[in-house]
Amino acid sequence: MKLIKSIVRPNKVDEVKAALEKLQISGMTVTEVRGHGKQKGHTAIYRGQEYNVSLLPKMEIEVVVPDSMADDAIKAIIEAARTGEIGDGRVFVLPVAESYKIRTGERQVD
């Protein structure tokens, strides 16, 4: 199994969710996060004062998929989240050795 963590623009979450649902991937965790990469933030003005916004709002989407579906899921996320501009986000792929259902204690191995 693979854990796919993707950091995307907040306005792209619904598109990514729809792309994953087309692949019958329904279980996911979505978290509001803040950070920056090459974008490095921007300068804003609030009540006449200029200040630096270095941590930009993003959304983190996490899904666990079988190894056989990982490449398709990654491709779907990238296509749905891409705008072609700096700040589109990143996709990280981590191995998952096993998982357990809390309610039943059932162990799942890929």
Image (cartoon, rainbow, N blue to C red):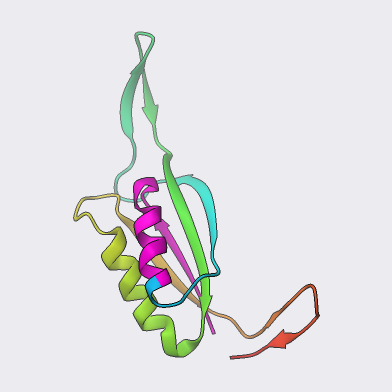
- Across and down, in percent, residue 97 comes to 62, 85
Q: Is residue 14 above or below residue 46?
A: below
Q: Residue furthest top?
A: 48
Q: Is residue 44 magenta?
A: no
Q: Is residue 55 shown left or right of residue 40?
A: right
Image-quadrant location for residue 74: bottom left
- Across and down, in percent, residue 81 comes to 31, 59
Q: Nearer the viewer, residue 9 or 49?
A: 9
Q: Is residue 55 above or below residue 85?
A: above
- Across and down, in percent, residue 65 comes to 51, 80
Image-quadrant location for residue 1: bottom right
Image-quadrant location for residue 21: bottom left
Q: Is residue 82 shown left or right of residue 30?
A: left
Q: Nearer the viewer, residue 78 or 47?
A: 78
Residue, x 51% and y 86% (percent of image)? 66
Residue, x 45% and y 77% (percent of image)? 24
- Across and down, in percent, residue 28 comes to 54, 65
Q: Which residues are magenta?
A: 1-21
Q: Is residue 36 above or below residue 27?
A: above
Residue, x 37% and y 61% (percent of image)? 16
Residue, x 45% and y 51% (percent of image)? 59
